[in-house]
Amino acid sequence: MPGGEGIKIFARIRPTKRPSRFFDIDPDSHTMNFNIPKDTANGILVNNARTNYRFKFDGVFGMDATQEDVFNVVAKSSVDSVLEGYNSTIFAYGQTGSGKTFTITGGAARYSDRGVIPRVLTYLYEKCKKDNTAQYSIYISFLEIYNENGFDLLDDAHENATDMNDLQKVAIMEDDSGNMHLNGLSMNLASSPDEAMNLLFVGDTNRVMSETSMNKTSSRSHCIFTISVESRKPGSDIIKRSKLNLVDLAGSER
């Protein structure tokens, strides 16, 4: 990323009617403090287990944070970086049910519940439309990884497949220069945000359909939504390419 920026880590607290009594947030210092009581179920014993933990993040979102807040702080700069030619990745990590998919994809109940991916697409196409200095082409790929096997969620074969074994697996290949390539993963041209959103919908639908044949719950699989951007200045033969990977990781129960 430009400006020497590297990895940034943010924490988001899922809203609940019964907040935990064991941690508190310090928004000024971007830290979370955990105080875990000692287990005295077996009576008074010598117990040197650690009870206090302090974790520092680049930012902490409380229970009142909106989807727009998350996009503005976490994702907006990544879109700007991709348009400048830098690759970027955003992924959600946490336990099953912690809200990863809601953050990345969003909810269907309200328009304001749109997640990172829909907001990224809207912002990206708006920026490209306003830029008169270059011509842009945007491609969408959608990969699911389960049990170390990759599947193209935008593969037309999903329509007739009765089992995931009927689908061609995506293979990871390495060229002579050490670059990694995903063989069998389609890149789909999306000329408008509506076309890109439709590809997201198709991929999500295929992911849900695959749960019955491959995995009982989607929390066991990783999903990677990749936006590939190609730009070229008028009259130039030089093409600038970059990618933004938006990842909904499988649930981590540790």
Image (cartoon, grey):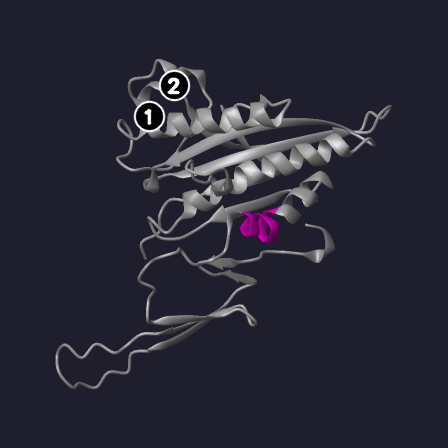
Residue 209: assigned label: 1
The reply to whether the C-beta atoms of the residues labelled 1 and 2 are less than 8 Å apart is yes
Q: CA distance from mark 1 to mark 2?
A: 9 Å
Give the extent of the magenta segment: 68-75
Residue 110 coordinates in the image, percent (x, y) = 45, 39
Q: Main secondary structure of the magenta part?
A: helix
Quarter of the view holding residue 245: top right
Please give the residue where the numbered disc 2 appears in the rendered image. Answer: 158
Q: Which mark is residue 148?
A: none
**Horizontal and vertical percent for residue 184?**
49, 23
Q: Nearer the viewer, residue 247 or 237?
A: 247
Secondary element type, mark 2: helix
Label 2: few (<14), some (14–19) or many (≥20) C-alpha neighbours in 10 Å: many
- Residue 51: quadrant of the picture: bottom left
Q: Is residue 140 left or right of residue 43?
A: right
Res. 225 visible in picture: yes
Q: Is residue 84 magenta?
A: no
> What is the number of callouts on the image?
2
Amino acid type, callout 2: His
